[in-house]
Image (spheres, rainbow, N blue to C red):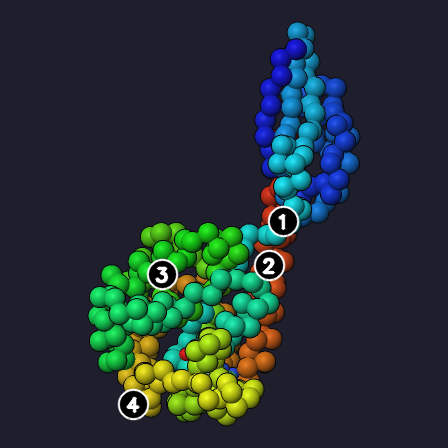
Amino acid sequence: MVSLGISFSCVAAARTTPSLASSPSCSNNKPFASLHTTRSLETSRVPFRLEISYDRRFSAELRWKPSAAARSGSVVATTKPEPLKIMISGAPASGKGTQCELIEKKYGLVHIAAGDLLRAEIGAGTENGKRAKEYMEKGMLVPSEIVVMMVKERLLQPDAQEKGWLLDGYPRSLSQATALEDLRIRPDLFILLDISEDILIERVVGRRLDPVTGKIYHLKYSPPENEEIAARLTQRFDDTEEKVKLRLKTHHLNVEDVLSTYKDVIFKVNGDAPIEDVFVEIDKALSSILEEKSRIDSASMAAGMTHWIC
Ligand SMILES: Nc1ncnc2c1ncn2[C@@H]1O[C@H](COP(=O)(O)OP(=O)(O)O)[C@@H](O)[C@H]1O
């Protein structure tokens, strides 16, 4: 008897180990459904090892066996669909950071804000940080050679790859969008927060940041919870009416190019609405993408198993 072992990752599979059921022979190309396994359709990635044994007459015997990882209990039935990949865009102070906090909390995505990466470089006093600050103070975009690498490296970190990512305020120009396309980094959804200009100025001048928790506040719309927090709030150096007008001009100059790159996945939301209402819209869109991903995952697993076995 010759034994051939093939490792196989079964996606929608068995909550319980499949019984070591087998088809007496594979030569008649029986469809997978005819195998007597105790499978229940569930989204759990449980790796099994499929053993095919041939005897001298070349009649084959199939056996499902849990892989070493499954036997050792290190496999947890936690299959989620492919993680979400989301971009969020909008004028300065349109509410990106605020919505990202809510999305991060509900969906567990890794929030990557290009502005925060740059401000961290500035804070650390690096050469890149010093150069970046010169541009940011003028309301201009930081040159791509500084920012592209920074964002790319962050996106490729294991946490972002595993949990999914939420890219905030990036890309902001055609060259940045093209750089991501070249790396085959594409979002499932490109959220665009649409906001009117007068509301935006009011939001910028009232915006404050808690340096301890990283939470964003607004003196009027989302005030700090207590005096202690209020006392330590800081204001961003570019959050003045004068600077926001320059930033807005830059935004308008570039936004159409960026939108053209993602036109098939754009989701426009009215950013003038209260924080909770904006989130309801975003939440609906993200849940339906997750459902769709889950459906595709199950369907492709079923198709893959049938194809492989037959
Ligand atoms: N929908 C909203 N309604 C009222 N205020 C908001 C809303 N979204 C954000 N804000 C406030 O506006 C300011 C800018 O929001 P923020 O999320 O920091 O914008 P961005 O990240 O787009 O620059 C913050 O002070 C925030 O608390």
Quadrant holding the C terminus: top right
Calculate the distance from the C-alpha at mark 1 to the C-alpha at mark 4. Answer: 49 Å
| Of marks 2 and 1, the one in the foreground | 1
- Going from N to C along the chain, the mark reached first, 2 or 3, is 3
- Going from N to C along the chain, the mark reached first, 2 or 4, is 4
Q: Position of residue 2 (x, y in %)?
A: 62, 13
Quadrant holding the N terminus: top right
- Tell me the kind of residue under disc 4: Glu
Q: Position of residue 304 (x, y in %)?
A: 60, 37
Neighbourhood count class around disc 2 (C-alpha, 10 Å): few under 14, some 14–19, many 20 upward: some
Q: Is residue 245 visible?
A: no
Numbered label attached to residue 290: 2
Please report contact status of discs 2 and 4: CB closer than 8 Å, yes or no: no
- Tell me the kind of residue under disc 2: Leu
| Of marks 2 and 4, the one in the foreground | 4
Neighbourhood count class around disc 3 (C-alpha, 10 Å): few under 14, some 14–19, many 20 upward: many
Numbered label attached to residue 242: 4
The residue at which mark 1 appears reads as 79
Disc 3 residue lies near ligand 1 with CB under 8 A? no
Residue at image position (67%, 7%) is 57
- Tell me the kind of residue under disc 1: Thr
- Tell me the kind of residue under disc 3: Val
Q: Is residue 158 left or right of residue 306?
A: left
Neighbourhood count class around disc 4 (C-alpha, 10 Å): few under 14, some 14–19, many 20 upward: few
